[in-house]
Image (cartoon, rainbow, N blue to C red):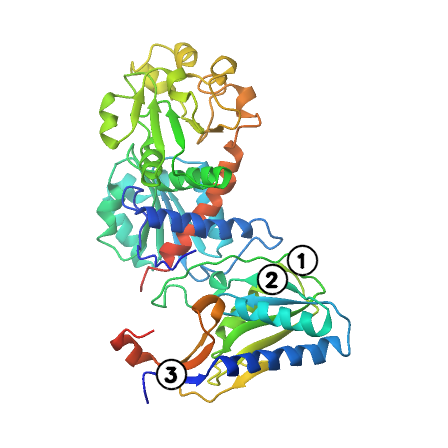
Amino acid sequence: MGKFNWTKKDLLSIYDLSPEEISFILDTAKEFKKVSQRNVKKVPALRGKTVVNFFIEPSTRTRMSFELAEQRLSADIINISASSSSLKKGETLLDTIRNIEALQADLIVMRHSAAGAHAMLADKISCGILNAGDGAHSHPTQALLDMFTIREKKGSIKGLKVAIVGDILHSRVARSDAWGLLKLGAEVRLAGPSTLVPKEFEAMGVKVYHNLKEAIEGVDVVNLLRIQHERQQAGFFPSTGEYAKFFGLNKETEKYLKPDTLIMHPGPINRGIELDSALADGARSVILEQVTNGLAVRMAVLFLVAGCVKK
Amino acid sequence: MPAKKEVCNADGVRAAVQKVADGIISEFLDHSTRDFAIIGIHQQGVPLAKRLISIIKEKTGYSPELALLDISMYRDDIGVRQDLPQINETLIPFDMNDKAVILVDDVLSSGRTIRAALDALTDYGRPSLIRLAVLVNRGNHEFPIGADYTGIALEVPKERKVAVEFVESDGQDRVSTIDWKKQLSQGDK
């Protein structure tokens, strides 16, 4: 690892990070992954620090992963969900956050339905803010864990072909993955129905496909996104059955993959819709490793950001 | 005093490493069982640990196992210090339980690094014995921690820092003292 200094007190989006910063997080995460493999799965790095998990949108896996990461770093933790917060009583988001800050919290991990909510707060408070998802905008730790998994399996990201398939339009995972992978030099393909993957995405520097076979042929990684039933009700595609037929990865479409193509999914999976069970549980699937790596990556960003929060 | 002042050159460093190795040999290989490991603390403890192993092997035929330890996750000043933590690889390729281990670092100063290293080690297991070997013991200890094997003992005023350079990492063998303030204002290494 070369000499590098981390200088950010917040993790807001992948777009804000330089390729060097992304690589530095991934390098740091490598050592944190080992902590979870020891008998004593805990280090005192964040001892005496208070982390508030503020999830205004529901979340199970990201929240669990952050919480466990904080515990393994020995931080003190408070959890606030939308239903238990004073936002319900009409308090503004900024006031809620300032109240958390007044309790001398060091870091706030937040999920919010509004894109840009974290960036708006970050300048106004001295706590570090970590984005655990904001609307359809950004989900930086998911992108980091995806990149960590790809790098671990493939050695490097530069030059790889990665297809992201599904509801790109509404997906913060797709946007964050695409930005991160582009920064590290991958070729990114976005695929799905034209209603969910408009051609405008090509302005990012990716290729857009409306045909699954063309999109996944010869790729090193295919990342499938969950198809949400409410999108069908809103008329983005006719039926989940039809979506599965044209964009699902199954025995038929699997033929276009290479023997060593990684199959990824941020979860939760709709088995039989975007991904067949046999493939989700097959040898090329790294879906559960993504979960393991998510913990390591979150430990790394909590550690780095905490190191920059000055009191 | 100049901003940077040499304490010893390559010959001095070689003799100091030799002295540390001899100390280890006389405790471990002359009298007791030949089963101990050497743990280098990043950064500069690692090249020193490797040199000690090679000298011990050359002199006695026994090659102690090498482990690498990064103590960033165990520091007591996260969020306080200016330069931010950079984590290097921790690699402990043996069972720490009931093992005799020698921690190796370049300089013993406040003792805080060693305190962190002791915490880290005990999270990996329960060694039967832990010794500390340093190339330079500079005084100004802030913790009740002393070295078992010392290459060079110095009395250095608090405002000066001791810098150890090794060929492996810096291109030359040298020990010098540096004035913190002058170093900052002049941008000297």
Q: Residue at x 57, y 27 (%)?
A: A283
The location of residue B20, given as percent across then percent down, is 61, 79
Q: Are marks 2 and 3 in contact (CB under 8 Å)?
A: no
Looking at the rendered structure, the secondary structure element under dot 3 is strand
Q: The disc labelled 1 sits on which kind of residue? A: Phe
Q: The disc labelled 2 sits on which kind of residue? A: Ala
Residue A39 in sight from this viewpoint: yes
Q: Residue at x 40, y 88 (%)?
A: B157
Q: Is residue A141 above or below residue A273?
A: below
Q: CA distance from mark 1 to mark 2?
A: 8 Å
Q: Are marks 2 and 3 on the same chain?
A: yes
Q: CA distance from mark 2 to mark 3?
A: 30 Å
The location of residue A246, given as percent across then percent down, is 40, 12
Position of residue A181 in the picture relative to residue A203 (left or right): right
> Residue beneath label 2, please?
B67
> Residue beneath label 1, please?
B94
Label 3 or label 1, whichever comes before in sequence order: 1
Q: The disc labelled 3 sits on which kind of residue? A: Arg
Q: Is residue B135 above or below residue A153?
A: below
Q: Are marks 1 and 2 in contact (CB under 8 Å)?
A: yes
Question: Which numbered circle lies on residue A33?
Answer: none
Q: Are marks 3 and 1 on the same chain?
A: yes
Label 2 marks a residue whose chain is B
Question: Which numbered circle lies on residue B160?
Answer: 3
Residue B76 in sight from this viewpoint: no
